[in-house]
Image (cartoon, rainbow, N blue to C red):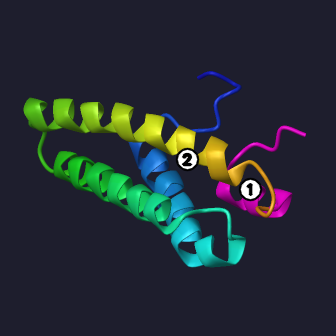
Amino acid sequence: MNHSDFIPRPDAEFETFFRNITDFVLDNYARLGNIPKADADQLESDFDEWNNAYEKTLVPHIPQLTAEKNRVRVRTERALRAFINRFLRWPPVTDLERDKLGIRNWI
């Protein structure tokens, strides 16, 4: 594991991490004031795409479903990183909130 990476590698942990970020944003984007509604909606859509692909792999193994889950993970992880770097690394998100979300504080 890359020690500078804050996104968990195991899919189950990524699922929880992504869900927590998405729930936080949807619950707080108006309060934070720095996240446009369209960006919050896109984050939710990305999570839903990931969640749907991931859940299909929790049943007996089907290689095509696993390949699709992996493809979706690469795309949604890239989108999640960009979202975090654009909106969640800076105030008004607090260090405490970032800690709770599992986002490393760089300062």
Circle 2 crowding by C-alpha within 10 Å: few under 14, some 14–19, many from 20: some
Residue located beneath label 1 in the image: 98
Q: Quadrant of residue 30?
A: bottom right
Q: CA distance from mark 2 to mark 1?
A: 13 Å
Q: Is residue 36 left or right of residue 64?
A: right
Tag 2, which secondary structure? helix
Q: Residue at x 75, y 42 (%)?
A: 104
Q: Which residues are magenta?
A: 94-107
The percent coordinates of residue 3 (x first, y second) are 69, 25
At a point 78% along the width and 51% down the height, the residue shown is 90
Locate the N terminus and report the quarter of the image it occupies: top right
Q: Position of residue 40 (x, y in %)?
A: 48, 63
Q: Where's residue 49, x and y in %?
A: 27, 52
| Residue for badge 2 | 83
Query: Is there any visible trace of residue 64 in the rendered image?
Result: yes
Task: State which mark lies toward you, 2 or 1.
Answer: 2
Q: Is residue 69 magenta?
A: no
Mark 2 and mark 1 residues within 8 Å of each other at the beta carbon:
no
Q: Seen in the image, is 41 located left or right of residue 96?
A: left
**Which residue is rendered at x = 31% and y = 49% of the image?**
50
Using residue 62 as the reference point, say whether residue 72 is left or right of it: right
